[in-house]
Every structure is written in structure tokens, then in C-alpha cells.
Image (tube, rainbow, N blue to C red):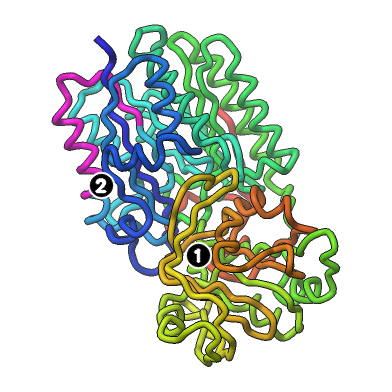
Amino acid sequence: MPFHVLTGAFVHESNTFKKGETSLQDFRDDVLDLGQAAIDRFGDVNDELAGFLDAGRAAGWKVTHTVSAHATPGAVVSQEAFDHIAGLICNAAAEHRDTLDGILLSLHGSMVPSFCEDGEGELLRRLRAIVGPDMPIAVTLDLHAMVTPAMVEQAQILVSYKTYPHVDMRQIGRQAGDLLDATMRGAVKPRTLRVHVPMLDEANAGRTDVPETAALYAAAAAHEAEPGILAVSINAGFSEADITEMGPTVLVTHDKGHEARAAEIASGLARRIWDGRGKVANTFLTPDQAAAEARDFDPAQGPLVIADYADNPGAGAYGDATALLQALLKAGAAPGAFAPMIDPEAAAILHRHKVGDIVTLEIGGKCDPTFGGGPLRLTGEIVHLSDGTYTGDGPILGGITHSFGPTAVLRVQGIDILLVTLPGQMLDLQQVRTFGIEPARLRFLVVKSMQHFRAAFEPVSGKVIVCDTGALATPQAHLRPYARVRRPVWPLDKDASFPLP
């Protein structure tokens, strides 16, 4: 009889400093696909589910897929949303418990529900109560996971991405699936060891285009070739989630009998993360500095790409900070584009007009003006209106269709501002080209993203610079009111230390 494997995806990165909650509707607006609908959408693209299915085909499994649920990073997940999506997975586990041989899940690792600090640990605890202590559970995690003791207690196998920008989702899904298959066959008896580092996050947030950080992931991959070492994961952490167990972790999933070597590997990599705590690769420019560089930039080799790092929707920021746009307008830096400005109210107003209309309205800065600036009253020409649907063609979103909801492009002083309804960070060139913005025709292009934009936008740029606009995901961590993280912690406490066991 073939092995029967239950699969599912429940992915959210929760910014606990953001107002409000991430609702069930937020998942519906992004991804909440059941069963075959999820397989149709994600079964042959760069997604963990595709890797799960690759492993299942190779091993001849029977796969029951429950749900693929994703919401753009944002505020804590509401209890209604968590219970509904977790319930879809847990109810399926209960229904098929008597025939199941294993469970394979795509999670994030930094989901914080409104009622507890550890969404992934809570989901796994609920599953364990249904399937018992022995059923193998394998989990994939984002590189920015905050891995808790509960997570490694409840799942035997944990495998995290090794790239940032994240481009190895399918590969990691396949790796986790292959390890689950070996476990179900009795070839290995895995457990996962965890070492936590007392930092808010890794110095470069896991950037694998920074040599020192990339070397950590190369070392992790090399260790996976050792006997008895099944997976080595370096999790950079997520400094926008204030929980007790926040911070980087090193995980070593190992076979029975290899505990001592696993501990050596984990401790050695953790020490390297700690020793590199002050070596930050980014140079963070102020909005005025970035605007001056944009004004004077020669785009002969491609546009200047400006990352609005602090207002990255992919870190749960509001995506409506105006400080950089204001500086660019003041500097007269056109021609350029600014993408996106997440402002449902402005998008709705523009959709009451037609292309070519001249409109005056307030843009951005409406969620929390203390982070990144307040609304700007601007007059511009509507040059594009759409329903916001786009299909990616780059290394992260290739073949995947998403929507910004009602979307407009307003041209103000030669700057095309992409105004959207639904949140999302810049990951793919089709997120601008679909709406009539062509980077090759610009002097500069602002993208609200920290790092993922590099996969698609850096190859067409003349240069990339990074701006700290003071928005919610600012690298100036001391501006956020941490209350739960275990202290002392770097860099909030310069006297923090890291004594290894």
C-alpha cells in the first residue's frame, strides 16, 4: 500500500507592532485555496506544495491536500482566521487519521495569533493531540522563522529556505518530503535540535547576497552531506514580531544516534551568527539623500532602484509611508515611479474617474503617520486603471497570479504612483509592467521591499540603493516598543552576551 500523506500550507508573518488584526478575509483576498484548487494553482510553480508533490510522485504516495492559506505579512492573526484555517487541517487529520502515515506542512515560523505568541507551535500541538506522538510530521519554514521550543518538540523534521530573496521554495519542499518518506520507510528516526541566539535578528536578516551571511547557508548545506545529519536550517528571525522566543535560531534535524554532532554543528553556526552581529551590509540613506541621488542619476544602464526598506509590506509595514515620495517630488527627480502606495481610499476615489482625468486628493500616510509620514495632498493625471490582477514571470512569482485589487496609476510631476487596494511587496517586474510602468523608461523606480525585490529588479537596474523612511519596519529597532522579548538582547542591549552550552 502506498503511504498516505496529509499536506497543507498556513503561512503568515505577523508584525506585532502593526495596528489591527489579519482577518480571515485577508487570507481570502490573498490565498485561501482548498484541495485541488490549491494544487491547480501551486502544484507546478516555485512553491513548497510543488516540492511536496514532486516527492510524493517519486515515492508513490497518496496525497490529501487540505488547504493553501497565505496572507500578506501584517498584524497579528485573528482567532477566527487561525481557528478556521487550522481547523481545516486538523479536521482532515481527524478524518483520515486511521490511514495516515505522515503529515507535511508549509508554515512560516513567525505567525503570531491574537491569543498566543506561537501560531505554528499551537497548530502542531493541535495536530499532535489528534494523531498521537509517533506520526512523523515534516515542516518547511521561511528563512525568517522564529522557531520556538514547542515547534521542535511537536515536529520531527523542520527544513527552512536557504535563500533570501527566497527562490528555493520548491526545492525545500522536495527536501522535506524526501525526509518524510525516509522516516515513514523506517530508514531514519529524525529529531530536530535547536540553538537560539539572543539577537532580534541576524545582522543582515539572512541576505544570501552578502558574502558573510551566504557563507552560513553554504556551511549549512555542506553539513547536510555528513552521515546522520538530515537538514541544517539557519533562521534569521523577524525583528518586527515581539515575542519571548524571537531571534535567530539554528536547527539541525538529525538521525537517531547523531545528537552530539548535531549539537556541535548548531552551536558552531550560532556562534558565527553572534560574532557577525555588528557587520551590517546595507547603507541606509535618508529620504532626502535618496531623492538627491535619484535627481542626479544617469539611467543609461538602467534605472536607479530605491528600496523603501522601512515601509516593506512584506515585513508587515503599512506600505503607505510618504516621506520618500515627498522628498522625490521636492527634489524634482522625475521621470520615475513609486510602487506601490497601499491606499484603498485613494484607489477607490481614482476609480470613480477615467484615464486622462486630473484629480486632486490625499495620498498615503493614513494608517499611522508617526511611522513614515502623513498624507500628501497631490494633483495628478490618471494614466492607468485596472482590477489589479497580474501574473508573475520572475524567479519568485513566475506563473503565479495575484491581485492588488482596484489599482490606479497617478502621474504627479512626472512620477507615476502605483496606488493599490490590497497589500503586497514588490517581488516581480509584472507588478509594475502590468500597469503600464516600464522600468527601462525611468530615471528611478521606488520599490517597497527590503530584499526580495532584488531577484527581479536588480538585473534591470543601473544601481540599487536602500532608504530608511522611518516606517514601521525601520532598521532602527529601538524605535519600536518591545515588551515581550527576553532581555538582554542585541542590539537593544549592548551588554548582551551569548554563552554557549
Residue 399: image location, x then y, percent: 50, 45
Judge left or right: residue 305 versus residue 48: right
Image coords of residue 473 (percent x, y): 55, 62
Q: Nearer the viewer, residue 312 or 245?
A: 312
Q: Amino acid at mark 1?
A: Ala
**Segment tinted magenta in the rendering:** 84-104
Q: Residue beneath label 1, please?
A: 317
Where is mark 2, residue-wise? 85
- Please indicate, yes or no, whether residue 135 appears anywhere in the rendered image: no
Question: How far apart are labels 1 and 2 at the CA level?
Answer: 24 Å
Residue drawn where x is 38% and y is 43% of the image: 41
Q: Is residue 115 above or below residue 272?
A: below
Instruction: Inspect the magenta stretch and tell me whether residue 90 lies in it.
Output: yes
Image quadrant for the C terminus? top right
User: Neighbour class for label 2 at 10 Å: few (<14), some, many (≥20)?
Assistant: many
Residue at image location 33% in from the left, 13% down from the top: 184
**Element on which disc 2 rests:** helix
Is 153 rendered above or below residue 443?
above
Q: Residues within 10 Å of mark 1 (few under 14, many from 20)?
A: many
* Image position of 118 with respect to 463: above or below: above
- Where is residue 248? Give x, y as percent: 54, 41
Residue 334 placement, left or right of 84: right
